Amino acid sequence: MIPAYSELYLSDASLALGSMLETAVYLFEVDLKEFWRLFLASHVSDDFGNGLSGTVSGKSGWELAAEILDDAGIPFRREKPRGGVGRSREFWAGWALAQYQWRIGLPFRAIETFAPIETILLLYTPYHEMSVDHFVEAIETQRKTLPSQRPFATMTAKEKHPMTESLSATVKTADWKAEKHVPVITAPAAAKAGEPFDVEIAVGKEIPHPNTAQHHIAWMALHFVPAGANTSIELARIDLSAHGASLSDVPGPAATAPSARVRVSLAVSGTLHATAYCNLHGLWTSAAPISVA
Ligand SMILES: [Fe+2]
């Protein structure tokens, strides 16, 4: 396989892709999966894969991220670049993907079909501490062991550009200490049958989520799934309405913080599920088991 561009540019290219992801997530505050979807749909991913010199070495990560969002018409927090990039998992994911793509030569869209961006992120530990050859080997193993994997050229248009077909596939979750959207459930691990107890749901406990008319948590819900059941019971729904949306002097004089406490009683054990909806970044969820006796 002849690489699309000279090895001389590989270091710049990896730095640009890593810094593009880090900028999109931490400066521009765009969800990683959403941004990666926009990247794959953009000319930047093709230019990058084809080794266009102005893309792989001529632009900073900030410029690439801004170009992708501007082209897609997505509003974002246009924060100025700060120094010291390269410490995040997202940076490593972009850096490692550029290295893999250079070696294997597949378009990024094809790579996504067997190594989605969220999978790459999970490989951060332990691969960021190893030579990139180990990462390349791991992804190659994944590519070759997937039974449905076919050459990109023979895929249907739908396979080349996989679309989400069910709502449940768009509901996201993550470690709440690292991801500001995840609703945190604070509830006892055990309760007495029929005896009321408090459940708190809050978004942004560790990393605050923006709370403005343009970007806020619009609602949260608490559900309970009894052990062994396949249907949830809605315990509470919280509309967070005050974000200055009806005022011209945004952010306005009042705002509702994404936090609520509800009193619950249960008759059986099961799992509490919290859901939170960000007007820009969609649905997020988390769960907490509870034992009832
Ligand atoms: Fe958000």
Image (cartoon, rainbow, N blue to C red):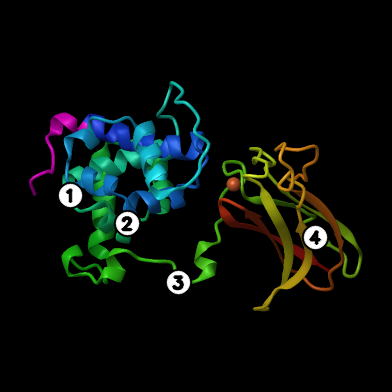
Asked if residue 202 lies left or right of residue 103, the reply is right
Horizontal side of 264 relative to 45 (left or right) equals right
Of circles 1 and 4, the one toward us is 1
Density class for disc 1 (Cα within 10 Å; few <14, some 14-19, many ≥20) is some
- Asked whether 275 falls inside the magenta stretch, the response is no
Magenta stretch secondary structure, dominant: loop
Name the residue: 44% across, 34% down. Answer: 23
Q: Which residue is mark 2?
A: 112
Q: Where, quadrant-wise, is the C terminus in this rendering? A: bottom right
Q: Dot 4 surroundings within 10 Å: few (below 14), some, or many (20 or more)?
A: few
Q: Residue at x 68, y 41 (%)?
A: 212
Name which residue type carries label 4.
Ala
The secondary structure type at the circle numbered 1 is helix
Position of residue 95 relative to residue 42, above or below, is: above
Look at label 1 and name its amino acid.
Ile
Amino acid residing under circle 3:
Glu
Q: Which residue is mark 3?
A: 165
x, y percentage for residue 80? Answer: 47, 26
Where's residue 210, x and y in %? Answer: 65, 40
Tell me how far mark 2 sits from mark 4, CA to CA.
41 Å
Q: CA distance from mark 4 to mark 3?
A: 37 Å
> Is label 3 within 8 A of ligand 1 (CB to nearest ligand atom)?
no
**Residue 283 visible in the snapshot:** yes
User: Which residue lies at the image location 90% right of the left edge and 70% below the top edge?
Assistant: 194
Q: Which of the labelled discs sits on residue 190, or is there none? A: 4
Look at the numbered disc 2 and give the secondary structure of its residue: helix
- Tell me if 130 is positioned left or right of 262 in this view: left
